[in-house]
Amino acid sequence: MPKRILQGTVTSDANDQTVTVLVERRFRHPVLKKTVRKTKKYRAHDERNAFKVGDQVRIQECAPKSKTKRWEVIAG
């Protein structure tokens, strides 16, 4: 099964080798027919601490790295 890839913005890089990524998805509401924006935060593994707050990154699913990290950064 292919691994999911999401794109988002880094909102925190305070922890070592970890970034928090805010991913926004847009969809049309089934009843109201209005475009709705939903956001979700993911904690991702950043091996080299290369990414800072505000960077656009792509994250990919991976095996659990810690209690909260199930994603890893693949590109800036």
Image (cartoon, rainbow, N blue to C red):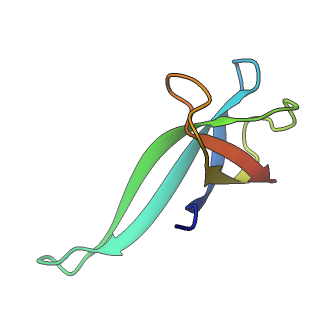
In the image, taking residue 14 as reference, residue 47 lies left or right, namely: right
Q: Residue at x 76, y 47 (%)?
A: 55
Q: Which x, y percent locates residue 28?
A: 29, 77
Considering every residue shown, the one lying at the far left of the view is 31
Above/below status of 44 relative to 56: above
Left or right for 11, reference 16: left
- What residue do we see at 49% from left, 40% from top? 41
Identify which residue is drawn at 87% across, 36% down: 50
- Toward the top, the furthest residue is 15
Return the residue nearer the eye: 76 or 63: 63
How many numbered discs?
Answer: 0
Q: Residue 13's image quarter?
A: top right
Where residue 38 sits, quadrant-wise, is: bottom left
Residue lying furthest front in this view? 1
Q: Residue at x 22, y 74 (%)?
A: 29
Residue 23 in picture, x, y percent from top left: 53, 52
Measured along the vertical axis of the image, is residue 8 above or below residue 69?
A: below
Measured along the vertical axis of the image, is residue 76 above or below residue 18?
Answer: below
Q: Position of residue 18 (x, y in %)?
A: 69, 28
Residue 75, image quadrant: bottom right
- The percent coordinates of residue 15 (x first, y second) are 69, 18
| Direction from residue 22 to residue 29 in the image, left or right | left
